[in-house]
Image: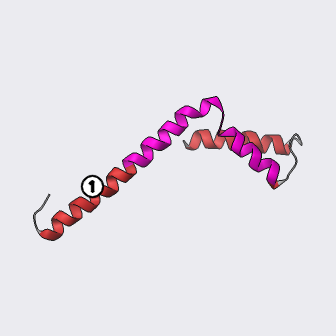
């Protein structure tokens, strides 16, 4: 995920430095929004969803284990 985000950011920075894109917030924001709508963004999108699903499952499991330990039942 970080690699893809860095590559997209570097591409935008290169275009700004070369003068192809003006150094304006609106133009850069539009490019960032458009870069996430590319056809190659499906795999990073899926990986973000899987990452957050695992994170949420970890939170729920931690809560469950904590409640069990608090009641003295163990895990």
Where residue 51 appears, as percent x and y from the top left, is 44, 45
Up the image or down, 56 lies above or below 7; here it is: below
Would residue 75 appear left or right of 62 to someone viewing this image?
Answer: left
Q: What number of labels is visible?
A: 1
Where residue 24 appears, as percent x and y from the top left, is 84, 53
The quarter of the picture where the C terminus appears is bottom left
Residue highlighted by disc 1: 61
Q: Is residue 42 magenta?
A: yes
Q: Which residue lies at the image location 62% right of the left edge and 43% below the top edge?
A: 5
Where residue 61 appears, as percent x and y from the top left, is 27, 55
Q: Which residue lies at the image location 83% right of the left edge and 45% below the top edge?
A: 16
> 1 and 52: which one is in front?
52
Would residue 62 appear left or right of 45 to someone viewing this image?
Answer: left
Up the image or down, 27 lies above or below 43; here it is: below
Where residue 8 appears, as percent x and y from the top left, is 68, 40
> 45 and 69: which one is in front?
45
The quarter of the picture where the N terminus appears is top right
Q: Which residue lies at the image location 12% right of the left edge and 61% below the top edge?
A: 74
* Secondary structure predominantly adopted by residues drawn in magenta: helix
Q: Which of the 4 quarters of the picture holds residue 39?
A: top right
Q: Which residue lies at the image location 37% right of the left edge and 47% below the top edge?
A: 54
Question: Magenta residues?
Answer: 26-54
Q: Residues within 10 Å of mark 1 (few under 14, many from 20)?
A: few
């Amino acid at each position: 995920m970080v690699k893809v985000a860095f590559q997209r950011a570097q591409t935008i920075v290169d275009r700004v430095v070369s003068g192809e894109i003006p150094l304006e917030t609106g133009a850069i924001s539009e490019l960032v929004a458009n870069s996430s709508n590319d056809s190659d963004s499906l795999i990073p999108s899926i990986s973000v969803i899987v990452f957050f699903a695992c994170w949420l499952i970890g939170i729920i499991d931690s809560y469950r284990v904590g409640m069990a330990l608090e009641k003295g039942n163990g895990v």
